[in-house]
Structures are given as structure tokens and as C-alpha cells.
């Protein structure tokens, strides 16, 4: 079904090794004009996490701004891909390949138009749900086994509204405040997932 599996050798495709054991990636678009847009909810969540962890994503590596930190005793790479949303997989798979991290240890934080602003939904795996960044990660890795944290950005105002225009629109001030409160739960959700308690994370935050 997937055609780009040669990014990994058959021997080491998803074997975990190396210093980094988990990757947490927030999806979004670079450039100042995309700040506070709905499609950048993943970036906003990872920035919130990094503040809580006392680290900064300022190293440019794997086509991303990233940093390493420790969560639940595990060395974790935090990433904000700079490839633009639709090519997020280029950055994620490059980091997976370098550290030999399997998909189950890559936690993707992304926006979801099917959820109201302020809602969070955690999933163990699954399809891309129409989110193109997630679709590219699944396509380039050949796997849909990525745990993900979905952040609500609200549905289009009406069915005829252009989807691209909607996800690239900015949150209102009230919506942004609500999103930030939700992003406060991103770190504890990630902690539960890394600790092997994804069911508890779903019960707490879904």
C-alpha cells in the first residue's frame, strides 16, 4: 500500500535504539504570518510544553526546530517541523530514522476541525482524519500506529467556507485563551502516554 518504505532498511525499520526514546512533534506552519492560526495548534501546544519543561526549541535539525528533554525518565525529542504542514512527514521520518524510534513512540500533536476549540482527543493510532500533515507522516513512514493528541480548532462557519482559508485563519482572542488552557493538558497527556498509560490519558482528557 505504501511505496516509500525504503526510508528504513528491513532490518532496522522500527527498532528502538539510540539516545532518544520518544519523539513529540507538534504540527504547524513556520513564518510569522501563521502565528496563532488554527493550523498551528500543534506548535502552540509544544511551545506550552517546552515552557513547562524549561527548555527551548532553538536547534535546527531534522528540518525542524527541536530540543531534547526528559519526560518520565525517558529522553524525548520535541519537534516543530519547518517543512510546512503538508510535508511534515519529511521531518518526522528523518528524526525517526536517525534515532531508530518506532511509530508507537512518536506522539503527534495536531489540530482537528471536528472538535470545538477547547476540546482534546487522544488516540492510540488511526487514519489521518483528513489532516494533511498527519497524512504525510503516515504516507512517508508506512505506518498509522502513531499516538496522537488532537486539539479542537472548531468547524468551518458554514459548509461552503473554504477549508484552507478556515484552518489558516487566526483564533479570536477568546478562542486563543481557551486553546492555551487546553494546551496546559498536553504535557500531562504526554507523560501518561510515555508512562504506558494511554488509556488513563484518554479517560482524563478526552
Image (cartoon, rainbow, N blue to C red):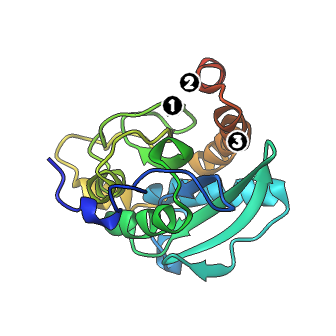
Q: Pointer 2: what residue?
A: 206
Q: Residue at x 79, y 60 (%)?
A: 51
* Residue 3's disc number: none
Discs 1, 2 touching: Cβ within 8 Å: yes
Q: Is residue 206 visible?
A: yes
Image height of 191 relative to 85, above or below: above
Of the pair 76 and 152, the residue shown nearer to us: 76
Task: Mark 1 and mark 3 in contact? Answer it, CB < 8 Å.
Answer: no
Q: Nearer the viewer, mark 1 or mark 3?
A: 1
SS state under label 2: loop
x then y, percent, for residue 185? 70, 38
| Residue drawn at (72%, 43%) of the image | 187
Residue 121 is tagged as: 1
Quadrant in the rendering for residue 10: bottom left
Q: Earlier in the sequence, mark 1 or mark 2?
A: 1
Secondary structure under tag 1 reads strand
Q: Quadrant of residue 80?
A: bottom right
The residues bearing labels 1 and 2 have C-alpha atoms spaced at a distance of: 5 Å
Q: Mark 3 highlights which residue?
A: 181
Q: Give residue 202's quadrant in the image.
A: top right
Q: Which residue is found at the position 47% from the left and 75% from the top?
A: 82
Amino acid at each position: 500500500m505504501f511505496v516509500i518504505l525504503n526510508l528504513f532498511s528491513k532490518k532496522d525499520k522500527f527498532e528502538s535504539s539510540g539516545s532518544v526514546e520518544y519523539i513529540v512533534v507538534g504540527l504547524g506552519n513556520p513564518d510569522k504570518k501563521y502565528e496563532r492560526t488554527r493550523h498551528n495548534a500543534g506548535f502552540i501546544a509544544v511551545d506550552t510544553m517546552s515552557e513547562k519543561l524549561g527548555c527551548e526549541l532553538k536547534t535546527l535539525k531534522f528540518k525542524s526546530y527541536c530540543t531534547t528533554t526528559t519526560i518520565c525518565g525517558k529522553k524525548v525529542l520535541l519537534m516543530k517541523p519547518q517543512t510546512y504542514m503538508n510535508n511534515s512527514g519529511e521531518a518526522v521520518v528523518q528524526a525517526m530514522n536517525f534515532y531508530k524510534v518506532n511509530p508507537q513512540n512518536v506522539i503527534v500533536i495536531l489540530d482537528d476541525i471536528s472538535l470545538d476549540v477547547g476540546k482534546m482527543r487522544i488516540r492510540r493510532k488511526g487514519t489521518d482524519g483528513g489532516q494533511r500533515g498527519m497524512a504525510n507522516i503516515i504516507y512517508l513512514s508506512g505506518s498509522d500506529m502513531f499516538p496522537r493528541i488532537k486539539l479542537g480548532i472548531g468547524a468551518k462557519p458554514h459548509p461552503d467556507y473554504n477549508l484552507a482559508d478556515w484552518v489558516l485563519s487566526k483564533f479570536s482572542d477568546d478562542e486563543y485563551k481557551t486553546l492555551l488552557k487546553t494546551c496546559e493538558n498536553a504535557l500531562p497527556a504526554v507523560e501518561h502516554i510515555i508512562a504506558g498509560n494511554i488509556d488513563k490519558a484518554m479517560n482524563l482528557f478526552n
